[in-house]
Image (tube, grey):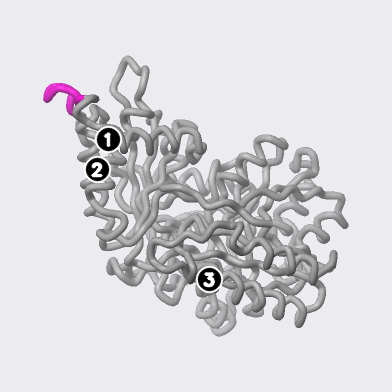
Amino acid sequence: MIVPLTRLFGTDGVRGRANAELTPELALALGRAAAEVLGAGRSMRPRFVIGRDTRASGPMLEHALVAGLLSAGADVTLLGVLSTPAVAYLTPALAADAGVVISASHNPAEYNGIKLIDARGRKLPDELEDRIEAAMRRDRVQDPPPSPRAVGGVARDEAAVARYVEHLAASVDVPLGGRRVVLDCGHGAAVRTAPDAFRRLGVAVEVLNDRPDGWNINDGCGSQHPEGLARAVVERGAFAGFAFDGDADRCIAVDEAGRIIDGDGILAVLALDLKARGRLPGDTVVATVMSNLGLERALARAGIRLLRTRVGDRYVLEGMLASGSRLGGEQSGHVILLDHATTGDGVLTALQLLAVAARRGQPLSQLAAVVERLPQAQRNVPLPSGTKPAPESYADAVAAAEARLSGRGRVVVRPSGTEPVIRILVEGEDAKEVETTAAFLEEAISRAAARG
């Protein structure tokens, strides 16, 4: 399978190295265009809410974005450091017309991003992103901005964090007290919400990586690096551990023995619990092409159908809305619980996983054992600056890899929507065959990338 290359907007907003590809000038133009497109046809000025993670470049991009929004006649409410799911929840809760998150999620600190959320708390569809991108390229001389008296205003919402934490706590319907967990906040946005949410529900909490300095976000910690959390859970005899990424829309869990449970394992645990309680409409779960076949088989044994989509939690959401499913997610730890959220929410996911353990009276190790993972190999082929090899340039290699597996596995090759790389996934029943096939594809696609 080959996924086509994308445009300015990737799978999760606009991203790049801060002050390099993602400049203040770009943020200003994006703010102005977003106000024009999302505020079109309104009798009143549109209102945007903005949150950001802990990156050093966040305030720079926030100021530029706000300037663009104000210059186009929008009002802005600043939420401060807050997670993507918090902004998604607060956008409709505060009756805003749109939300903005300034974050590069799991990427290193030198990267940043801008993602837009509609009035319902959902990420924008491609059609709206295309309209915003077109507006950014338009000649401003032919489309003059509002008069000085029509410039927007700025306010701050100091109660946003407390309101979101209350929402998280209200999602849990079983006592969680008497358990101790370790939380790895990844020096990101979770520092403002995750510990409070767990403690509010009576959980004893130990926190790792909760001292952001603008540059240590995701640095050897969080959902991308849960090994330190795993050690801490075992050393401290905790019931479980949960790691979040920079904008806290991902969760990776660790059981009491220090074993890592990725998004596939989490989806299986949540799905089986929801089905047992009659809360899984259509007995359907939505995941992406990256999810392990072991998840699909575990769900099938329980009479649950797995639907697959393109990579990106907004595509998962689209699949959920189309199928009527209330649960979906990604292997990376994005999990959407549609009864409580419109996007991946790492803290909500962690709370719900702990609630299943409390409801069932079982440890996470026993709950997650239902998934027997098939061997997978993943590779990232870096793209030289400015190059985007056409999928046709490596189509023969993909076809050869699929033929090599001959029905015993699958291949996914796609350009990343968040980084300048082409991602390769090979999965099958034979670990050695999987590794050799992945190496073959990596070499072939590297040659194609070098040719440009």
Dot 1 corresponds to which residue? 32
| Magenta-span inclusion, residue 147 | yes
Q: Looking at the picture, how far across and down is residue 386, in whole percent?
A: 39, 61
Residues at marks 2 and 1 touching, judged by CB atoms closer than 8 Å = yes
Residue flagged by tag 2: what amino acid is it? Leu
Dot 2 corresponds to which residue? 28
Whether residue 291 can be seen here:
yes
Question: For the point 52% across and 76% down, which residue is it?
Answer: 229
Front one among 38 and 215: 38
Front one among 450 and 182: 450
Question: For the point 45% across and 74% down, which residue is it?
Answer: 221
**In the shown orientation, is residue 277 left or right of residue 102?**
right
Question: For the point 34% across and 52% down, which residue is it?
Answer: 52
Magenta range: 144-151
Dot 3 corresponds to which residue? 381
Residue flagged by tag 3: what amino acid is it? Val
